Image (cartoon, helix red, strand yellow):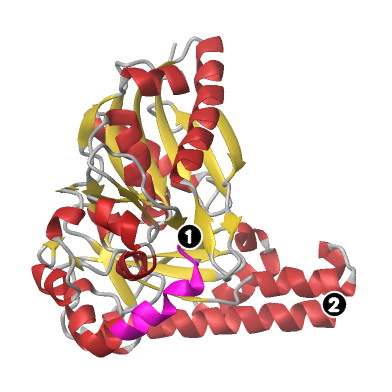
Amino acid sequence: MAEAFIGLDLGTTGIKAVAFDAADRELAAAAMATPTHRTADGGAEYDADELWATACAVLRRVTNRLAAAANQPVAIATASMGESGVLVDDGGVPVAPVLAWFDPRTEPQAAWWVENVGAARTTAITGIPPRAVFGATKMLWMREHRGDAWRRGRRWLNIADWAAYRLSGRMATDHTLASRTMLFDLAARRWSDELLDAAALDPALLAPLVPSGHPLGPVLPAAAAATGLPTTVQVGAGGQDHVCAALALGVTEPGMLLDSIGTAEAFFLVSEGFDATGRVAAAGIGQGAHVIPDRTYAMTGLQRGGGRIDARRIELGLDWPDFLASAEGIEITEEVAREGQARIGELMAATGTDAIRHLATGGGSRNRLLIERKRDLGGRPIEVATQTEATAAGAAALARRAVGVR
């Protein structure tokens, strides 16, 4: 019998639960699509109870498989996209739909923030420039457009926090998720009274801060009945999906770069602490808290990443070998490689980083030609990750941390 540590990943397209043993070997997994609702005014929303029901369904499948193999769940932690939040009342009941992180309806609130709070002021405190994606703009939107719900709301929980609350009964958030609210003082590692006051937001709205992997308590009886998890299972604070993935892939030391090549491409560089010189902010690069205590990261990306390559292949109607051997395939791959290398160069210059250890992940990392061109252009080795469930694996590692298992 193996002890099992479960990572629950509430992502944009799917909700996954994956169980690992203490040596990071996968024991069981299940996934379902994330239920998302489009609105008539162009928005995108989640129903918090529907998210929880989906999470329960995937956890039930995993716990059944663990039981069939006589494996014992010990701890669980949650990861999620970083910018969406659940507004709950005094009893922890959701009072409004959840705006998806990519919902464009918060653009006016972001513009208000820039004009009334200030971009430079915000970035100097939080490490991120004001944008519509972040949690604070969703709070302002809710206050403006869902006044009745806003007045009943008492606590804002990030998606991973919401799942952890339903599991344990404790409301808390970790530093990585707090970093995506636009209300977190990154250097001081606390909520920013200055920004809360500027936005006229009640500090009590925000959950208490805890480190990633902090024990929140055992699984509640009601959650045990819904998921199949024993009430002896410890719930640990998780984190933002990108940062949990970095933990699982070993991207934890300063100078390590995680290159996540998907439809878009994200570049995640670990640093020792918050850069307060203004160089990173001036380059339009965001910073945030790592799950490793006292570590930060700088992150930038390309909205049009590796997805351009596959789109061109489909347009031409070619299979991968023929496409990569074609002039069109070589041309678009070269374009993606050069743009990515240029962005990495900007990231290194802004952070004052002379050398990096480069790790690639995501679907695009399996494109041999792309990786070869990136290696040639950068003049450095690139490791390709083999872990395909990195976010869940990172959450499971935080579950182990919650019970003192390394």
Q: Position of residue 175 (x, y in %)?
A: 23, 55
Q: Position of residue 363 (x, y in %)?
A: 63, 58
Q: Is residue 108 magenta?
A: yes
Quarter of the image that includes the C terminus: top left
Q: Is residue 7 left or right of residue 338?
A: left
Q: Which residues are magenta?
A: 101-112
Determine which residue is flagged by label 1: 100
Q: Is residue 381 left or right of residue 208?
A: right
- In-front residue for pair 300/116: 116
When the figure is inspected, residue 106 is found, relative to residue 56, above or below; the finding is below
Judged by its main secondary structure, the magenta piece is: helix
Q: Is residue 194 magenta?
A: no
Determine which residue is flagged by label 2: 326
Quarter-of-image position of residue 198: bottom left
When the figure is inspected, residue 177 is found, relative to residue 201, above or below; the finding is above
Q: Is residue 6 left or right of residue 187?
A: right
Residue at (21, 33) in percent of width and height: 215
Residue at (33, 17) in percent of width and height: 221
